[in-house]
Amino acid sequence: MRTPAAVLVEPGKPLALAELEIPALKPGQVLVEVAFSGVCRTQLLETRGEKGPDAHLPHALGHEGSGTVREAGPGVSKVKPGQDVVLTWMKGSGAEAGGAVYRWGSRTVNAGAMTTFQRLAVVSESRLVALPPGLPAAAASLMGCALPTGFGMIFNVLRLAPGQSVAVFGAGGVGLCAAAAARCAGAGVTVVVDPRADRRAAALALGATRALAPGPGLADELRALAPEGFDAAVEASGRTEAMAAALACVRPRGGSAVVAGNARFGEMLAVDPRELNAGKRLLGTWGGDNEPDRDFPRWAGLIAEHGLDLAPLLGAAYPLARVNEALADLESGRVLRPLLDLSLA
Ligand SMILES: [Zn+2]
């Protein structure tokens, strides 16, 4: 059995379109027919060679998706054939079977415990979660990365209380999900900062109370909205200036800024240490500190309860053959979060 797949052969070059031979399933592995895959900044940085040295070339990629289980390997009990699932890079319960290895003609192609830029994927049981009811397959693909990262930052990391204020830097998939989560948490002033007008509009549609463009006047505008400083800030742009700005805008004595964006390899973050002396907290997070089996149904429940329309988050859908165009559109900002529709492959 074979599958079409996008393969990273050489960073800085377009992804190659390949036909991969599906290997026999090992214990803990599951064969999934991918429906939709998100395309996020992580794959963009990998493809552009901006995540540092890559020891696994050539390799498959993609780390959020939705699909249907086709075959369960030995010992798999969490999911069964025919079941709809979310594919996520976040490790949950179940076997961790390690990376899959595919044949591509005479070559070997590596994969992590899960990949999604392919029609059929061999995935570790631990990277699958039953599809929460009520989520359409396209939106469900975001449950693998952007949605849980945004919701997890608000509910797991910042533990935002009703009425608290929050500033979100960057209105890509993760930032917009954080704004939507803030609305679900009953946040007060919720400001989203992004240079693009269409993204600011999406942020307002998803629950932000204000949307601002970055620029020389930004610090003053933020101060006018939260004179004592924001209770919390989320950085989701990957820009180190935004990380510093997130820390700068939270209140002394207990304001928290959490960084989720991926900076380019080698970039360093400079902050004024007096911000820390003032009792501000600068936090990191592993994708919103999710326990996927516990949290994904929780986020889906909040989305349903609050009647959130995720349409502003969903970008254009591309067939796999146009994956390089999807990456270019993500890079230029033309498309918020491109999706691959693997049924077109
Ligand atoms: Zn991602």
Image (cartoon, grey):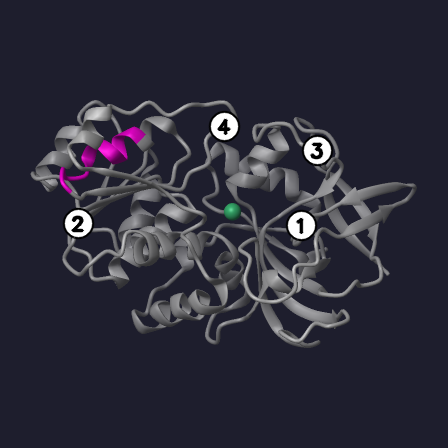
Closest to the observer: 211 or 303?
A: 303
Numbered badge on residue 93: none
Closest to the observer: 281 or 266?
A: 281
Q: Quadrant of residue 79?
A: bottom right
Q: Taking the image as drawn, is residue 213 in sight? A: no
Q: Taking the image as drawn, is residue 262 in sight? A: yes
Q: In this rendering, would 128 be left or right of 308?
A: right
Numbered badge on residue 55: 3
* Figure check: 289 above or below 71: above
Q: Which residue is painted at 29% across and 29% down in the image? A: 244
Tag 4 or tag 1, which sits nearer the N-term? 1
Q: To which residue does mark 1 refer? A: 117
Q: To which residue does mark 2 refer? A: 165
Tag 2 or tag 3, which sits nearer the N-term? 3
Q: Position of residue 243 (x, y in %)?
A: 33, 32
Tag 3 or tag 1, which sits nearer the N-term? 3
Q: Amino acid at mark 2?
A: Ser
C-alpha separation, residue under disc 1 versus residue under disc 3: 19 Å
Q: Helix, strand, or loop for circle 3?
A: loop
Check residue 251 for magenta coloring.
Answer: yes
Q: Which residue is painted at 17% across and 26% down in the image? A: 217
Quadrant position of the N terminus in the picture: bottom right
Q: Amino acid at mark 4?
A: Arg
Residue contact between numbered discs 3 and 4, judged by CB atoms under 8 Å: no
Q: In this rendering, would 39 be left or right of 280?
A: right
Residue contact between numbered discs 3 and 2, judged by CB atoms under 8 Å: no
Tag 1 or tag 2, which sits nearer the N-term? 1
Q: Which residue is painted at 56% across and 66% down in the image? A: 93
Q: Quadrant of residue 45?
A: top right
Q: Main secondary structure of the magenta part?
A: helix
Judged by depth in the image, the label closer to the viewer, 3 or 2, is: 3
